Amino acid sequence: MGSRGGQGAVVTAHRDVRWYAVTHITDYHYSAPVTSSYGRGHLFPRTTAAQRCLDATVTVSPAPTDASSGTDVHGNETVFFHVTTPHEHLRVTARSLVAVRAPDPTQLTTGSAVEPWEDARPAGRADAAVDVEFALDLEPPEITDDVREYAAESLRPRRPLAEAVFDLQRRIHRDFTYRSGSTTTTTTVAHVMATRTGVCQDFARVAAACLRSHGLAARYVSGYLSTTPPPGKERMVGVDASHAWVSVRTSDGRWLDVDPTNDQWCDERYVTVAVGRDYDDVPPLRGIIYTDSARSRIQVSVDVAPVLPTVR
């Protein structure tokens, strides 16, 4: 229904670039027929300075009556579909080919990354309008006294930005327990702070709230992480999952991505799909259905497969 082909640039094989074929399949099962289904999703990987989406398609079954694509306020590509064929099973399949360049190893040890973190605050800068929205709290508010106090331990006065941010994410990784199913997309940051449990989207949201509590611009990032099987084991298909991490804005307009779920800076294993202020800005799929169904079930399969580069 939706597709985007190569953008005409020449992409060559390079040892610092990794290529991935991404397949993201979402299956909805209903206990009674759905007569009308409206869906909107963020399923096309972004093209950035470090990443290029060379091909992307989204297909829906049953075939939609109406479909379109566009760009949201944050520059993410979106797809929309309307299915009017009665159905008890809906499948949305997104496929993309993405090239991701390894980050410059000096980006964390030079320039704005080693300036005091206070210098990265957008308030008072001439270009503040570009990213000030990412420094603001959400509605309803997520920044509490607990969030400010937790962040303050890492954001000590005049500490270098990269050092402070990495310390914050490392503490989140240490202090919070990853527990699948412990939260939902509506769980608040306050709840995660109180229980110290969650999943990747919760840890990204906690980190973003902490950074914003001290005036820094922070983005919630959704995407994928390519996983490596244990030594001697074959790579399994369909076990990778959607992932989330956080990005902080430097004083010179760069964004540094860090993953508190895995205690590391993001590198060429990460595929960015969408950025926003929160999960609600960038869900993979969201929609409305018309049905008498009393029960529904969703299954998601994500595969991020390394592939050999094709020279164009």
Image (tube, rainbow, N blue to C red):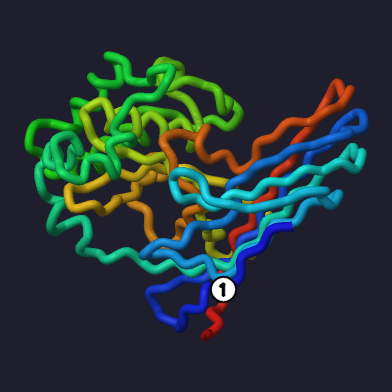
Q: Residue at x 13, y 59 (%)?
A: 110
Closer-to-camera residue (171/131): 131
Closer-to-camera residue (262/44): 44
Which image quadrant is residue 293 in?
top right
Coordinates of residue 42 in the picture (x, y in percent): 58, 47
In the figure, 26 relative to 184: above or below? below
Coordinates of residue 312 in the picture (x, y in percent): 53, 85
Q: Residue at x 57, y 46 (%)?
A: 242
How many labels, in total? 1
Q: Residue at x 77, y 43 (%)?
A: 82
What amino acid type is highlighted by mark number 1?
Answer: Gly
On the question of residue 236 being in view, the answer is no
Coordinates of residue 92 in the picture (x, y in percent): 74, 49
On the question of residue 72 being in view, the answer is yes
How many C-alpha atoms fall within 10 Å of the one at disc 1: few (<14), some, or many (≥20)?
Answer: some
Left or right: where does residue 3 sit relative to residue 273?
Answer: right
In the figure, 239 relative to 145: above or below? below
Query: Label 1 belongs to which residue?
Result: 6
Which image quadrant is residue 41 in?
top right
